[in-house]
Amino acid sequence: MGGRDTDIILLDENGIRSDGRKVNETRKVTIKAGVLKNANGSAYIEFGDNKILVGVYGPRDVHPKHMSNTSTGILRCRYHMAPFSVGERKNPAPSRREIEISKVIKEALEPAVMLKEFPRTAVDVFMEVLQADGGTRCAALTGASVALADAGIPMRDLVAGCAAGKAADTVILDVNNEEDQAGQADLPIGYMPNLEKITLLQLDGVLTPEEYKACLEIGIDGCKQVYEIQKKALQEKYFSTGDVKNG
Amino acid sequence: MSNEKNRHVIPGEVITTGSYRSEQNTFAEGEKIISSIIGLSDIRDGSVRVIPLTGGYLPEDDDLVIGKIVSHSAMSWQVDINSCYEGMLPASDVFGRDFSSHSDDLTSKLDNGDLIAARIVNSDKTRDPLLTISGRELGKIDSGELMYLSPSKVPRLIGKRGSMIQMIESATNANVTIGQNGLIVIVCDDSNGLIKAINAVELIEEQAHVANLTDKVNEMLESKSE
C-alpha cells in the first residue's frame, strides 16, 4: 500500500474515477435471496464485478462434538475464493488471507445473530467468491447476512458491508480492485443500520484523523445504501406476490 | 411508523414503539420492538409477535410431530424429527414400566426407518427432546403418503381453528395427520382424493404467503371434482 506508481488515472480532473463513478458512489449492487435448493438459506450477490454465492446451513448438529456449546449455538464461517475468481489461477487450499477473512466475517455477524435459542447447535455460513474485484469481504458479509435471514436465523439486524478509502489523495466510497492496488487506503466497514452499530472495521493504509472520519462517514452512508438493496432482495423473495403490505 | 396490525417485516425492522410486550421472534431495544425474523407482525392486546415465513422446526412441549426412527440404544430410540435436535423415545414408553433391557428387544416394536406419530413431552433444549407415542392417534404409522411442508407453513395448512385442513379432509375424504415439524401423512382410500389432497398441500407450500389462500385451495379442490 501507500500509493504505488501506476499508469492508471484513479481520479480525473472532473472528479470521475477510473470506472466512471463519482467519489461518493457505490458500484451497482444486486442481491437475490434463496438461490440454492439444498441449503437452508442462500443468497447471490453481485457487488460491481464481484460475484459471490452464499449458502447457510443450520441450526444443525455440531461436528466435531467438542466444539458445541451447551449455552448457545455457534456460528461458523468459511470464506473461499474459487480457483477461477481471479486472473491467475488461485490455489483452492485456504490461504492465510481467506482464514483471516472468514474470522472477521464471523465476528462481524456474531453481534447480529441470536443463537441463544439454539444451544448445542451450529450455523454454518459458506461464502464462495466466484469472481473477485476488490471489496469481496464486504460483499461476502452483505450476502451472508441476507442468506442468514433467508434461513430464518433470528437476527438483531442485517449487517451491510461497504468499504471507503483513499486514492489520489481523495476520500472515495466503495474501493474497487484497481483503487485498492494503486490507492492509499482501504477501510472496510460492516454496519447494522437499524441499531447504528459497527461490527467490522479494518484499515489497510494510512489516513489522517480527518480523513479517517470522512471515510467512516461516507462508508456508513454506503452501508445504508447497500442495506436498502438487502431489504429489497428479501422482500422480493417473501412478499412479492399477493397482497402488498410492506412497511 | 404505522401501527397497522399485520405488516411484512425483516430482521432489524422496527415493528412499533411504546409500551408493548415483546413476544415470539421479537426483541425490545429501549422503547422499540424489533423483529428478529422475516415474517408477519401481529400486534394484539399490548403484545407483539412475528409469525415466521421461513426457518426450521424447534420442538415445543405438546407438539404433535411425525418422525423417523434412525437408531436405537439399549434404553431408547433416536428419532429424526426434522429439527436440529434429535428426538428421544424411551423404551419404557412403549414396553411399559416393567421394561427390561435384557429380555425386551427394541426392534421387535419399532425398527430403523419406521415412521411414528409422537408427541413432545419435554423440550428444554439442555438435552434432546423427549417423545411419547402413548396417546390417541399416536404410534407407528403403517400406511399413507408422506409429504414435506416447510415447518413455517404448517399453521397455514391447519388454518384458523383448523378450517383449512377440515376443508381439505371433507372434500377429499382423506385423513391427514399433520406434524408440527412439517411432515404430513395423508391416508385416503380413493386415489383421486389422495391426489387432490397432495395437490392442496403442494399449493399451500408454494403460495403460503398469498392472501385468501383458503379460496384458492377450495377452487382447486372443486375444479377437479367433476
Image (cartoon, helix red, strand yellow):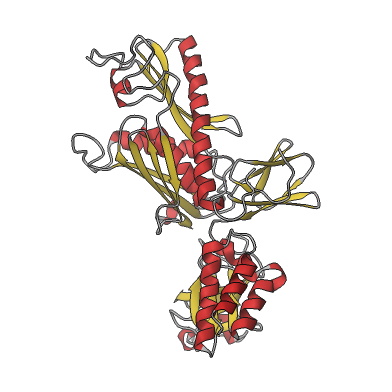
Seen in the picture, residue A97 relative to A82 is either above or below; the reply is: above
Q: Quadrant of residue A26?
A: top left
Nearest the camera: B114 or B213? B213
Residue B40 placement (x, y as % from top left):
64, 52
Residue A150 placement (x, y as % from top left):
50, 50
In the rendered image, the quadrant that contains the N terminus of chain A is top left
Q: Quadrant of residue B173?
A: bottom right
Residue B132 placement (x, y as % from top left):
61, 77
Nearest the camera: B46 or B203? B203
Instruction: Judge whether residue B142 can be spotted in this image.
Output: no
Seen in the picture, residue A76 relative to B78 is either above or below; the reply is: above
Residue at screen point 71% across, 38% down: B1
Seen in the picture, residue A230 relative to A244 is either above or below; the reply is: above
In the rendered image, the quadrant that contains the C terminus of chain A is top right
Q: Count the marks.
A: 0
> Is residue B160 rendered to the left or right of residue A170?
right
Instruction: Judge whether residue A180 can be spotted in this image.
Output: yes
Seen in the picture, residue A75 relative to A9 is either above or below; the reply is: below
Residue B143 placement (x, y as % from top left):
50, 86
Residue at screen point 23% across, 42% down: A83
Residue at screen point 43% across, 79% down: B112
Q: Quadrant of residue A183?
A: top left
